[in-house]
Amino acid sequence: MKFKTLIFLNLTFASIFCVDANIPIYGDEITDSNTQKNPTTVDTLVPSNSSQLLMSQENLSPETQNNTENVIPPLEEIKPVEYTLTPLQLFPFEPMTVETANILPVGAIYTNYGTLVFPKGSQGKGTGLQVYTLTINGGVTDKLQVGVTLSFFDDLLGSKFNGKPTDLGYFSLAPNVKYQLMKKDNYSLAIVGSLEWLKISSENGLFTSKNNFQTDNTFAGTIQVPFTYNVAKNYQWHIVGGLSFFPDTVNDGGDFYGTFFNIGTGLSFKFNERFGFFADINVPLGPGGNSVGTNGKVGKSLVWSTGLNYLHSPTVGVDLSISNRLGDTPATKLLTFLPDGNQVGVGLNVRYTPDIGHNYQSSFDTRPFQPLSDRDKQLLFDGITLSSPNTIRQGTFSVNGGIGPSANFQIGYGMSNDAQLEFIGQQLGDSDKPIGNSLKLGAATKLRFLNQAQGDPFSFGIKGAFEEATTKDDGVGAFSGEASFIYEANDKIAFMFNPKLGVFGSNRILGAGFGINFQPISGLQLMGEVTPMLSNDATTWAAGARYMPPQTNVGVGVYGTNAAGTGNIGSVVTQSQDNVSVGFNIMWLLGK
């Protein structure tokens, strides 16, 4: 089920990207990377600082400035460029388990994707117990918002149920609607409803009437009435009451949650333009329940979450949170993780609002983005085993795929000029590590913080990737995290430094990668990379060459490596018996 769900999740999320491509990208296609649009207005809030209002002369390229430095236009001809605030700027980030009365602006799209990872306990396998989520919401009118949320889990639970190791799978797809009943200066009131399809698979008396594995399809839903009070401009307090309905039984008589009322409260707060905090708690009142014990009986437990928010750009934000909730749909986020809601998971979520004709600001960096040179385009792509900190421009795509020790593909999408989402697939070569070589599918997010092309001393970014094996009998899920540095000594030599972490099963691999990228002639790159492991694991290395003809967006490469894969988790695992493989890859930048 997890394999099919991952494909569905990737296709669903990718479908919204094709409409967000509003910014010219490459140096050979434009003369100025910033396009001035007609001013738009913001009804809800007035921009509070200079990052929201940029004067038109600040958007001129250096060449244009040099050509006009002796021309002083009349003051009345200098017109400001006004950007529309994104939904992530209009309100503090919403809490996890309570609804709010905030409504998206008309035509605005809001997405939220991520994972909540619980400890694997004494029985679980792999990296941990992951709950994956995806939300897409859209503003229809100034009072109506519609959306859909997907949440799924498929793992061996960390505790025994009825004395036996127990596998649980659930999939929830939840169309939902929110209508704002009232809006005043300091408060608002709304009603939220969802009707959700649930697929439940389990065994050993957990949601089943028998010990054997059973699967059932059913429906659930919720009605919530949230009240939001604006304590201050950047501080909201939320109170919610509601009713959630689940079947009393599933799988031919197995106990299920039934119907219960709930009451909850939460707060969301912005310290400043970039950082915020949220906390929330929900109390089930019965007659049904929201929690399940190790005996399979349904009970009641508090469900809660708390976390920090970081707004990386006006359109991209990141949450780091802890919670004991089971799901993320309007109904399943009121349920606690099994058993009893005593487990605490760590959540990482990315919130994203695509710019579909709204004139959002693409970055907090007020420096004009320079057109990409041929060398810049080369360094947008990851190395062989080391990742690049650089990100593609907003609304554009990159494709990188090949065959070597592993078959792999990577499709990147520019969420902003400094944030990149990647859909990844990888089939590792044979390794002595217990990671398997079945196809792994997953997603990665890369955030860039420093950009040497914009005048910073070097480029720096971080990247995190989750991958799930498509078969349970051959392979486990994995997580990899990397901090990437590139220093361009000149237009021919770039040095790379890449601390990285790989996690799968009980394995924790920590390494520090070093690399060099040398361009002897225009378009040709020679690369060498080595990653000694600080965790007493074997060193990985790679060497190769790439060619991307000048004034084009397509390149090819050939390489040799002892790593089981060419990126993410494969870059920290060596091939079995000290094997070395030769491979090739193709790279392509797509965007106007």
Image (spheres, rainbow, N blue to C red):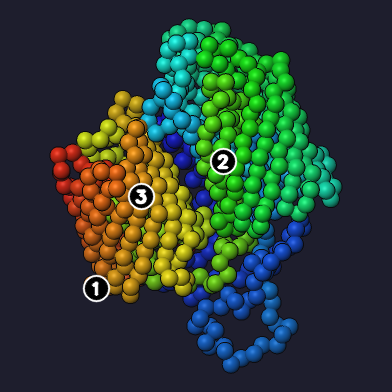
Q: Is residue 360 visible?
A: yes
Q: Is disc 2 placed on a helix, strand or loop?
A: strand
Which residue is the site of mark 3?
500
Label whose residue precedes the other's in the sequence (2 or 1): 2
Residue 406 figure quarter: top left
Q: Is disc 1 placed on a helix, strand or loop?
A: loop
Instruction: For marks 2 and 1, give the CA distance.
Output: 48 Å
The amino acid at mark 2 is Ser
Side of 45 relative to 591 (left or right): right
The amino acid at mark 1 is Ile
Q: Which numbered mark, 3 or 1, is in the foreground of this view?
A: 3
Q: Relative to the observer, which residue lies in front, 334 or 133?
A: 334
Label whose residue precedes the other's in the sequence (2 or 3): 2
Residue at 56%, 28% in the rendered image = 326
Q: Are marks 3 and 1 in contact (CB under 8 Å)?
A: no
Q: Relative to the observer, which residue lies in front, 431 or 469?
A: 431
Spot occupied by residue 508 in the image (x, y as percentages of width and height): 34, 39
Which residue is the site of mark 1?
521
Q: Which numbered mark, 2 or 1, is in the foreground of this view?
A: 2
Residue 192 figure quarter: top right
Instruction: For marks 3 and 1, give the CA distance.
Output: 31 Å
Seen in the picture, residue 591 relative to 4 is either above or below; the reply is below
Q: Are marks 2 and 3 in contact (CB under 8 Å)?
A: no
Label for residue 321? 2
Spot occupied by residue 390 in the image (x, y as percentages of width and height): 42, 61
Q: Relative to the observer, which residue lies in front, 507 or 225?
A: 507
Seen in the picture, residue 104 relative to 471 is either above or below; the reply is below
Side of 376 relative to 106 (left or right): left
The amino acid at mark 3 is Lys
Residue at 22%, 45% in the rendered image = 538
Label for residue 423? none
Residue at 61%, 30% in the rendered image = 333
